[in-house]
Amino acid sequence: MKSTSVARSLAQRALVRSLGSANCRSRSAHFKPHNENSRAEIAYSLLSKTDVLPTRNTFTVHPKWAHNSSAERKPAESVGEDASPKGSEKAVYVDPNVIDPFKLMEPHLRALTQNMKLMAESDNPLLQKVSQYFFDVPGKLFRPALIFLMAQASPPLGASNERQRRLAEIAEMIHTASLMHDDVMDHADKRRGVVALNSVHGNRLAILAGDFLLSRASINLARLQHIEVVELMSTVIAQLVEGEVMQASIDPADAFNFDFYMRKTYLKTASLLAHSCKSAVLLSGSEEFGLRSAADRAFEYGKHLGMAFQLQDDVLDFVGNPKTMGKPAGGDLREGLTTAPTLFALEERPELRDMIQRRFSQEGDAERALEIVRGSSGVDRCRALAREHATR
């Protein structure tokens, strides 16, 4: 998840769909759209109340992108930009008039970093220093931005409360802690354009810093005084660990299992978005009819958005612009990871099997696999699958 363009494009969609579709459904006693056009009209009506006027984005689906070529596909928005190799079809269009959700949420996001610093204060200067290491170099803040948008889409429309804002801070702290732990597991030397915490202070302090952030996030989670939200967000922490263990100790047979890959993707990426979106709706404080249904739909929305996010990130690892990404292509391969583009390419290029089984450990494996995947339909099929999740 290194591309700002991916986050911006997905979050733009989140603004329109969450304020339109999710809110309309949560207020089903009042709104009953019969088709996509009527739902869009309601979305426009609701957005006009927050002085936001969205415009539609489009893209063209090439037949070879189909995950299931026999299935009929509906147009949907692109979910990112890439530097595709020459000859591959690039179909990205971003309307210059579309609202930037990060700018819309800027006041909340600006306060978020300072609030997280306060939440992570410690009497031990070293612990405070390492636990706040990434707060001065924040990432895309995609997760809190999405939570703020979902909060404004929940009744009462256009407003967010203190508990929802605190939830956004908690979610970002959980995410930051997971990055600290991931960097130790992956022996990373850079994160967000700076030297990774484990490379500066060592693995032990990096792990303890992540643990401290999780503990502080848990304390503030309890202070929300909402038992179901506590359970939902605690589940996220457990599933992050489960996903990391799946990735670190994968059985050779599971390396070829697409369902295993998708389950791991949900646990490591989509779970946080799904549970956070649902929690944001539950914390609205509204007793309006349909809130429970809206919360369940918010969960599904966050889940599919998270899956689309990670699938597109997998695409960018093969065809992303190294300058934008901040790293060379094929990083996952060099870490021994098999992602969706490679699994799709395997169906066409069986020579990938041995490389996958040995986790690209031999000299030249990663470079050769990168070349093979780029020459297959693997990237396009992964991109199409991301779009499928983005439009559910």
Image (spheres, grey):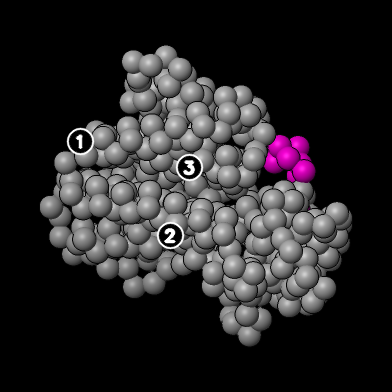
In the image, farthest residue toward the front: 204
Q: In this figure, which residue is indicated by the disc labeled 1?
A: 223
Question: Of the residues shown, which amino acid type is indicated by label 3?
Answer: Ser
Residue range highlighted in magenta: 318-328
Given residues 217 and 287, the one toward you in this image is 217
Toward which corner of the image does residue 98 lie, by quadrant?
top right
Q: In this figure, which residue is indicated by the disc labeled 2?
A: 303
Mark pair 1, 3: CA separation: 22 Å
Question: Of the residues shown, which amino acid type is indicated by label 1?
Answer: Arg
Q: Residue at x 32, y 68 (%)?
A: 33
Given residues 113 and 346, the one toward you in this image is 346
Q: Position of residue 23 (x, y in %)?
A: 30, 55
Name the mark nearer the viewer: 1 or 2. 1
Question: Of the residues shown, which amino acid type is indicated by label 2?
Answer: Lys
**208 is higher (above) or lower (below) than 25:** above
Q: Position of residue 255 (x, y in %)?
A: 63, 68
Crowd around label 1: few <14 · some 14–19 · many ≥20 (10 Å): few
Q: In this figure, which residue is indicated by the disc labeled 3?
A: 178
Given residues 224 and 182, the one toward you in this image is 182
Q: Residue at x 13, y 52 (%)?
A: 287
Q: Secondary structure at mark 2?
A: helix
Mark pair 2, 3: CA separation: 18 Å
For residue 71, the mark is: none
Q: Secondary structure at mark 3?
A: helix
